[in-house]
Amino acid sequence: MKRLLLPTVLVAFIALAIYQLSFFVANEALLPQSDSKSSGIENELPELVRLIDENIIPLVLKESSRTENETRTESDDLGSWEVQSQTWQLPVGISNKELGTRLEQFTSDIAPSAKVYRNRQDELIEVIRIYVGKRLTHRIELIPTLSEILPPAPDKATLVAVAVLDLGQSGTESNTILKREIPISVGILPYSPFALKQARDAVLGSKEVLVLVKKPINDSEELIQAILAVPNATGVAIGSPPADLPISELKRKDLYILDIQGQTESAALRKAINANIPILRVNHRFEQGDELRIRHLARVNPGLIITVSAKDMDATNSLLNWLSKSKPDEIRPVFVSELHSYLGQ
């Protein structure tokens, strides 16, 4: 009897152990799994960042000058790390495209676990982003020192749309900006003292009217009321990501949206894009002393949207004077809405 009982107990014990093990494995499968490869790379982050900071950047940019260096802290479910934002001014005649390529190649050779992504900002600034795993560690802007020698003129005149913003605060703008005999789009602040008058004066002076909304748009009704406060508007210039947009009203009035920051993103904007509402983005925000920059930009872009604030009359006059005096076979002034129509973007 005892000989029969012992194997029976042993079999039961083994069966229980197998059940518990299978239960544990099943539970583990249900738990969120981390990317072991990614987390392994991210564990190397301090050493990779040291390599980038102490070897790669100084080697590639040894002849350039760092003009800005900011650090911020980011975090994810694996911990926190620092992101560096750097701006480098290049010597005259040095191509930032070539330096961007060298930076990418050196990073691949010395720190192959890091990944480099590149893009162009307004066709003049090279932007480098370096990731370790899924973590952004460096954002580097390479800014060329522009020469008075311009790139060759394009075969067709560059379309330049200037939007003068912040109108409605001063009555003198009706006799200065709005009297200019060139196509200009003007951004008028709703509910400002001269909004209604200058919206009318702009149309009489053959200017394009935009509703300028700088504050965040929290709901559709806010924007609908702002549009009503600026008659004759053909577009809406926004200064921050909207939480909501009145899609049906924008389509009914055939309005476009101008992103005056040049890189605003939100779910509401994506919804507007899906509804075929044109979203245009500013190429350059003009300040006094930017004349050489826009001359270069006009040589490498088929179309430009440039903004300037009416609060800075020196900068406004400088930009509008350049636009008025430009050669017609090189620069063609247009409204913002015309630029969209001509370029189809």
Image (cartoon, helix red, strand yellow):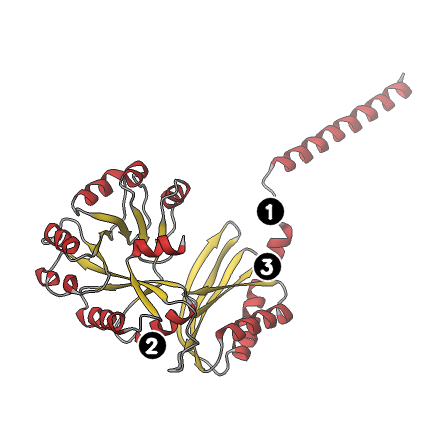
Q: Which of the two residues, 139 or 11, is positioned nearer the viewer here?
A: 139
Would you identify the image quadrant in which residue 44 lies?
Answer: bottom right
Q: With 115 as the anchor, is 235 left or right in this view?
A: left
| Residue for point 48% across, 74% down | 96
Label 1: which residue? 34
- Disc number placed over residue 43 in the picture, else none: 3
Q: Position of residue 116 (x, y in %)?
A: 55, 64
Q: Is residue 123 visible?
A: yes
| Residue for point 36% across, 48% down | 278
Identify the element where label 2 is drawn: helix
Q: CA distance from mark 1 to mark 2?
A: 50 Å
Q: Position of residue 158 (x, y in %)?
A: 37, 66
Note whether 292 is above or below 131 in the view shown.
below
Would you identify the image quadrant in which residue 132 lies?
Answer: bottom right
Q: Position of residue 324 (x, y in %)?
A: 24, 70
Note whether 149 is above or below 136 in the view shown.
below
Would you identify the image quadrant in which residue 250 lies?
Answer: top left
Q: Position of residue 201 (x, y in %)?
A: 12, 55
Q: Which of the two residues, 264 or 173, is positioned nearer the viewer here?
A: 173
Label 2: which residue? 292
Identify the element where label 3 is drawn: helix
Mark 1, Cα crowd under 10 Å, few <14 / some 14-19 / many 20+, is: few
| Label 3 or label 1, whichever comes before in sequence order | 1
Three-letter amino acid code at the position of disc 2? Leu
Three-letter amino acid code at the position of disc 3? Asn
